[in-house]
Structures are given as C-alpha cells and as structure tokens.
Image (cartoon, rainbow, N blue to C red):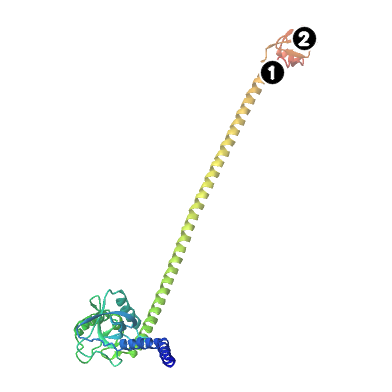
Amino acid sequence: MKKHMGVKLGVTFALLFSFLFSTPTQYYQVEAAKTKTEKKVKIKRTANKKVTVKVKKYIDGDTTRFKLKNGKNVTAKYLLIDTPDLKKESPYAKEAKARTKELLKDAKKIQIEYDKGKKRDSKKRELVYVWVDGKLVQETLADEGLGMVRSTKGKNTKYLDQIKKAEQKAKEQKLNIWSIENYAQADKGYSQAAVTAHVKALEKELEAKAAEEERLQKEQEAKEAEEKRAAEQAEAARKAEEKRIADEAAAAKKAEEQRLAQEAAAAEQAQQQAQAEAEATARAQQEAQAQQAAEPAQGQTVYVTPTGSKYHTHKCGNGTYSPATLEEAQARGLTPCSKCF
C-alpha cells in the first residue's frame, strides 16, 4: 500500500514538474511556429486586381515597402518606370523620392496591381503598378519628368502607352530629367557622362553669365558715375549761378543803399545849407533891422541930458533932456543909449 502510494506521488510530482517547467517552452514554440507560418503566408499575385496596402517604408522614387492586409511586408518595384538612382546621388533622384513620398503620404487609399507578365524581378521585388486615390503613380512621375519609361520583356505592358504619353509631354517641355541632354536613355538607365557634360556646360554658362553680369555691373557703375559727375557739375553750375545772382543782387542792393545814402546825405547837406542860408539871411535881416534901429535916420530928433554921454530916442530916465538932431548928437561924440536903441 505504501509502495503504491509512493509510486502515485512520484507520478504526480513528475506531471507537476513537467507542467511547471515545460509550459513556457511550449508557449514559445507555438509563437515561433505562428511567426514562421506568417512568414510563409502566400501572396496572391492576381493580374489586373488592385490590392489595398499601407506604406511601411519609403525607399526611393520607384521602390517602396508596403504592408499587406495579412501583415506581410513586401518591397515593390514600380512597373514601367525608372527614376534616377538615389544611392549614386543622380540628379533628380531625391526629387523623385520626395514626390513619390508626397503622393503616398497624402493618399487616402493606396493600391498595388500586378500585370499579366512577370511578378517579381531578380532582386525578389514585387513588380506592380501603384495607385493613389485612383491615380497611377508611374504616370504622374513620367508626366513630371521625374522618371522615364522602362519597359520589361513579357506581358507587363497594360499601362505602357499611357505612361509613354505622359513621358512624351515631359520630354517636349524638357522637365527635370529631360532638361539634361542624353541623361535619360531609354531602357539603358541614366548616363553619368551626360551629367558630367551637363555640369561642365552649366559651369561654362555660369562663368559666361557671371562675366556678362560683371560687364553689365561695370557699365552700370560707369553710367552711374557719369550721371553722378554730370549731376555734381549741374549742381555746381546751379549753385554758381545762384551765387552770381545773389552777388549781383547784393551788389545792386548795396549800390542802391549807397545811392540812397548819398542822396540822403546830399539832401541833408542841402537842407543844412538851406537852413544855414536861411539862418544867415535871418541874421542879416536881424542885423540890418538892428542896425537900422540902432542907426536912426539923419535929421531924426534925439534927446540928451546936460551931463550925459548918450543920446536917447525919448526921455528914458530922470533928469532934464534937451532935443537935438542926430547929426548934432553924433558931432558932440555922444553914443546911442542901449535901452533906447
């Protein structure tokens, strides 16, 4: 009985031990198997059927990694279009990638579509047409001169004419990649030699342009210097003329002031002379009158005192006055009285 119980307990512990320590291992094994199964999920590459996807990673202008509904990530190479190599830093490679990213990022719905021909390229990339809100991305890139038509052998030609038509339009307008002569070469890729030649041509063009700009700048500077010199001369002449006119006006004013001053001085002198003459005339008249008054006419009667030495025109004081003629008084040596005369 005890032996049976011991065996039973041993089995129980063994089962418990197995459960406790084996469960995690089984869990991880299940998860690993699940992951492995997801990786092996097959992609239905049905021609002419559009499949909705989401962007996983932007790679370059004509390559994008998408995520399918089943969780599978696929790297897609855009059919019938070839954009410049981003790794080689080819001209317009960054612009092409930026444009593709812009189209995909702003899209409400992104779809990929397989054609009837080859479904994958040598790098195991999915060969698809890419649609954003019903617009073919390859056509947009070709239309804007950011990619050229790159046809493939086989039956992948569904939208070839449509993309070629867009490409022709960009060629005629010399947009982007078509602005560099012989850069985009049909089904051969992009020519680095054409880029080198284009760069050299641009350098020469820039040098010529810089030389022309320098020449025009010098001409402009010379013209401005001449205009400045002419303006300075004109200004100097204007100031000289203004000064001449001002000097003449000042001289004329001064001459007029001098003339007026001379006339005023002459008038004042004439006035003074006239006044002097008038005063002299007045004095002469006064003297004549005084003399006339001081010298009575001959035969005039005057009066003298018995003891006086003066003769008077009248009795101007006390005493006895005797009449006499002027001649008699003057003959006696008498002088006129200052009070009477």
Q: How many marks?
A: 2
Q: What residue occupies the far front of the structure in this picture?
A: 1
User: For the residue marked with disc 1, what is the amino acid?
Assistant: Ala
* Comes first in the chain, label 1 or label 2: 1
Q: Which residue is mark 2?
A: 305
Q: In this picture, is 105 found above or below 253?
A: below
Could you tell me which secondary element the residue under label 2 belongs to?
loop
Nearest to the observer: residue 133 or residue 208: 133
Residue 209 seen by the camera: yes
Does residue 293 appear left or right of residue 321 in this picture? left
Does residue 223 appear left or right of residue 291 in this picture? left
Query: Percent x, y for residue 19?
Result: 40, 87
Residues under numbered marks 1 and 2 in contact, where contact means CB atoms less than 8 Å apart = no
Residue under the point 54% across and 44% down:
257
Q: Quadrant of residue 23?
A: bottom left
Query: Percent x, y for residue 101?
Result: 32, 78
Query: Percent x, y for residue 214?
Result: 42, 77
